[in-house]
Image: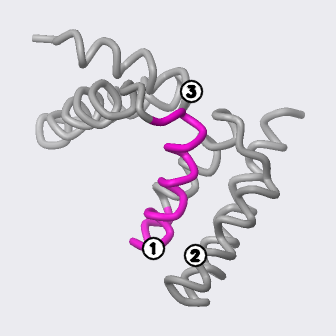
Amino acid sequence: MATEDYERGLALRKEVLGADYVERSFANADDFSRPMQQLSTEYCWGRIWCREGLSRRDRSLLNIGMISALNRPHELKLHVKAALTNGLSRDEIREALLQVAIYCGVPAGLDSTRIAREAFAEVDQAAE
């Protein structure tokens, strides 16, 4: 049963990540993975991302740093694209990744920069 947090999170998730991506995530979910999709939609997006304490832009900047530090390339690519949607510039994303390199290690910064470039290329290709 969908909660208010779930519905609010689903709307925001589609706005930030793109409706196609979110709908594909649910369409590809099976009985095993569907609860994770529901959990992240309700709690991550509906309860945390919808809070007023930080802007979407600030949340995106934090996510880029944390996801880079955690070495989660798939999620990083997704959140780099989301950061552009949420108002971060490519220069600001680069600066965040330089910060990652200093505090988390150059390999993390290099890998994250490569992933960000891939995300930018995909965004540019979709815009053509």
Q: Which residue is mark 3?
A: 18
Image quadrant containing the N terminus: top left
Q: Main secondary structure of the magenta part?
A: helix
Disc with the residue nearer the chain's start (3 vs 2): 3
Image quadrant containing the C terminus: top right
Residue 84: x percent and y percent?
70, 41
Instruction: Tell me the magenta residue range.
Output: 54-73
Q: Are marks 1 and 2 in contact (CB under 8 Å)?
A: yes
Specify the amino acid type for callout 1.
Ala
User: How far apart are the alpha carbons under marks 1 and 3?
Assistant: 25 Å
Q: Identify the disc placed on residue 87.
A: none
Is 101 situated left or right of 44 in this image? right
Q: Nearer the viewer, mark 1 or mark 3?
A: 1
Q: Which residue is mark 2?
A: 100
Residue 85: x percent and y percent?
67, 33
User: Which residue is found at the position 78% from the left and 47% from the top?
Assistant: 89
Specify the amino acid type for callout 2.
Val
User: Which residue is found at the position 71% from the left and 36% from the top?
Assistant: 87
Q: Identify the disc placed on residue 69.
A: 1
Is 117 situated left or right of 99 in this image? right
Q: Are marks 3 and 2 in contact (CB under 8 Å)?
A: no
**Foreground pick, 1 / 91:** 91
Q: Are marks 1 and 3 in contact (CB under 8 Å)?
A: no
Disc with the residue nearer the chain's start (1 vs 3): 3
User: How far apart are the alpha carbons under marks 3 and 2?
Assistant: 26 Å
Q: Is residue 80 above or below residue 2?
A: below
